[in-house]
Image (tube, rainbow, N blue to C red):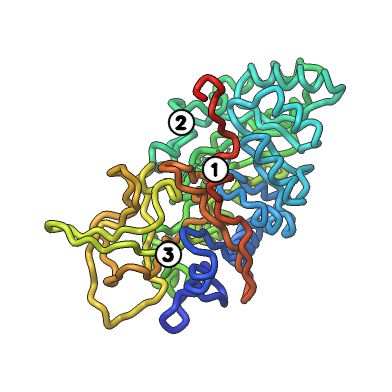
């Protein structure tokens, strides 16, 4: 559920009219609902009640400082994929003491920065990384806490580009090799074994692969508990969200209307299914949700520049493009597109909804039915809160878009749109061309 709905004709985020936000700050602009993020966090935490859990929000999904602060204020810890993400959490004024650091390519500098900041644990992805962490910890006179990311070889049944838990993926140490890797870890003087971790992929829409992973890991986890006294299991992120009927799924009634067995994965089902197996382990449980915390809490506002009627095809040309939201171009992902001002008296239009970039793949939707719209009117691309702004680029010399955070009737621009000067500040003409 989320807090985007029409009040009268106008789409609102909580109590804020989104057309007003678009007029005030221009477009393309991302808008996030703080209350939706809080609800997502509380629901997931509540679904595992009775277990000793810690949510480590996966910063990669949305690294906006205000979003990080909001989650930190609610008690969330964080999962970093780089030291840059860790620094963003610190810059947001949140603590990193309970946080974890993942990623297959941690550099020496990153490991040092994380150790100096006193993070909770490293999620180690190779034996080479173990040796490196041991070395860096030694130079600082510290002991590094680690868990090994175990690749369980489970198919998450999601898009191939976001599958991580099969043996064909670069992530983690294969489950068969994990005992030897732990054995090696136990020999390093500056390493303290604390846990086991696994993450099988993203936008996973069934609970089965999560349970299968847990069942595969359980015997190993129990063995590690006995041998090395591990105290936690991190079950990763990956919980899928609703993209197809994003707007309607903001209402409880929509969920009630979904037929039995066809209802999308909810945090409640996730928690209820995994809880018994987790309880048996008797370990602290870390979760690393990214998308499920922020995806439905964000929209991308865009202005219609032109309606171009082609031969047998219409094109609705927006001022947002694949540089602002790359997911459709990169993963063929679906984002619902709705007008900020709904007018049921207008005719429907079937069009490709595209951006202005000189690439055929700069297309948000093909043959999409939408209310007829014209120049200067606004649309919202729904469920854009995760992997939206963080993946934006400057392709075609387009600036990184603005971001706005809403809470109730309050809203503030939390990232200004990049200026041309900021875009070029690090560049120069070399002397030999002058
Ligand atoms: N933990 C680890 C170790 C991860 O690699 C990821 C995501 C997460 C947690 C969070 O997963 P989530 O709860 O967000 O599914 N850019 C892609 C998604 C890439 C996900 C990468 N890893 C997209 O736009 O769909």
Circle 2 SS class: loop
Circle 1 SS class: helix
Q: Tell me if 149 is positioned left or right of 374 in this view.
A: right
Q: Which residue is drawn at 12% across and 57% down?
A: 311
Between residue 66 and residue 101, name the one nearer to us: 66
Q: Residue at x 49, y 68 (%)?
A: 22
- First of labels 2, 1 by sequence position: 2
Q: Give the Cα separation between the discs numbered 3 and 1.
A: 26 Å
Find the residue positioned furthest to the right.
Answer: 141
The nearer-to-camera label among 2 and 1 is: 1
- Determine which residue is flagged by label 3: 380
Q: Give the Cα separation between the discs numbered 2 and 1.
A: 39 Å
- Determine which residue is flagged by label 2: 166
Circle 3 SS class: strand
- Structural crowding at the residue carrying mark 3, measured as other residues with C-alpha within 10 Å and reported as few (<14), some (14–19) or many (≥20): many
Is the Cβ of the residue at disc 3 closer than 8 Å to that at disc 1? no
Between residue 369 and residue 351, name the one nearer to us: 351
- Residue 260 lies in quadrant: bottom left
**369 shown above or below 81:** below
Whether disc 2's CB lies below 8 Å from ligand 1 is answered no
Residue 43 visible? The answer is no
Q: Position of residue 393 (x, y in %)?
A: 48, 43
Between residue 387 and residue 372, name the one nearer to us: 372
- Structural crowding at the residue carrying mark 2, measured as other residues with C-alpha within 10 Å and reported as few (<14), some (14–19) or many (≥20): some
Q: Position of residue 187 (x, y in %)?
A: 76, 15
- Residue 297 lies in quadrant: bottom right
- Determine which residue is flagged by label 1: 423
Whether disc 3's CB lies below 8 Å from ligand 1 is answered no
Is the Cβ of the residue at disc 2 closer than 8 Å to that at disc 3? no
């Amino acid at each position: 559920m989320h807090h985007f709905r029409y009040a009268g004709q106008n789409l609102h985020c909580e109590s804020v009219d989104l057309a007003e936000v678009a007029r005030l700050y221009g477009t393309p602009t991302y808008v996030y609902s703080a209350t939706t993020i809080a609800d997502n966090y509380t629901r997931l935490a509540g679904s595992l009640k009775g277990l000793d859990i810690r949510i480590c929000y996966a910063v990669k999904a949305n690294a906006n400082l205000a979003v990080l602060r909001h989650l930190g204020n609610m008690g969330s810890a964080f999962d970093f994929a780089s030291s840059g993400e860790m620094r963003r959490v610190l810059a947001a004024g949140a603590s990193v003491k309970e946080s974890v650091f993942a990623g297959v390519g941690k550099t020496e500098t990153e490991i040092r920065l994380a150790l100096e900041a006193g993070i909770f644990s490293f999620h180690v992805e190779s034996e080479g990384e173990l040796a490196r962490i041991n070395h860096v910890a030694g130079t600082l006179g510290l002991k590094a806490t680690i868990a090994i990311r175990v690749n369980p070889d489970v198919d998450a049944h999601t898009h191939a580009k976001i599958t991580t838990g099969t043996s064909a993926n670069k992530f983690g140490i294969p489950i068969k090799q994990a005992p030897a890797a732990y054995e090696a870890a136990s020999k390093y003087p500056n390493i303290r074994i604390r846990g086991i971790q696994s993450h099988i992929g993203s936008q996973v829409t069934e609970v089965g692969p999560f349970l299968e992973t847990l069942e595969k890991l359980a015997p190993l986890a129990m063995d590690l508990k006995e041998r090395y006294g591990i105290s936690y299991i991190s079950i990763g992120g990956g919980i899928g969200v609703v993209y197809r009927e994003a707007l309607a799924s903001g209402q409880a009634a929509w969920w009630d209307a979904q037929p039995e067995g066809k209802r999308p994965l909810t945090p409640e089902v996730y928690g209820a299914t995994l809880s018994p197996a987790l309880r048996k382990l008797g370990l602290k449980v870390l979760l690393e949700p990214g998308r499920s915390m922020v995806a439905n809490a964000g929209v991308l506002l865009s202005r219609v520049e032109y309606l171009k009627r082609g031969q047998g095809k219409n094109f609705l040309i927006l001022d947002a493009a694949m540089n602002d939201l790359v997911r459709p171009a990169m993963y063929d992902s679906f984002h619902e597109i709705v007008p900020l001002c709904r007018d049921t008296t207008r005719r429907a239009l079937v069009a490709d909804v595209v951006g202005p970039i000189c690439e055929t793949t700069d297309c948000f939707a093909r043959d999409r039915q939408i209310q007829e719209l014209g120049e200067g009117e606004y649309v919202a691309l729904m469920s854009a809160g995760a992997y939206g702004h963080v993946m934006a680029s400057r392709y075609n010399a387009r600036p990184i878009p603005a971001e706005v955070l809403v809470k109730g009737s309050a809203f503030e621009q939390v990232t200004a749109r990049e200026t041309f000067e900021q875009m070029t500040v690090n560049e120069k003409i070399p002397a030999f061309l002058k």
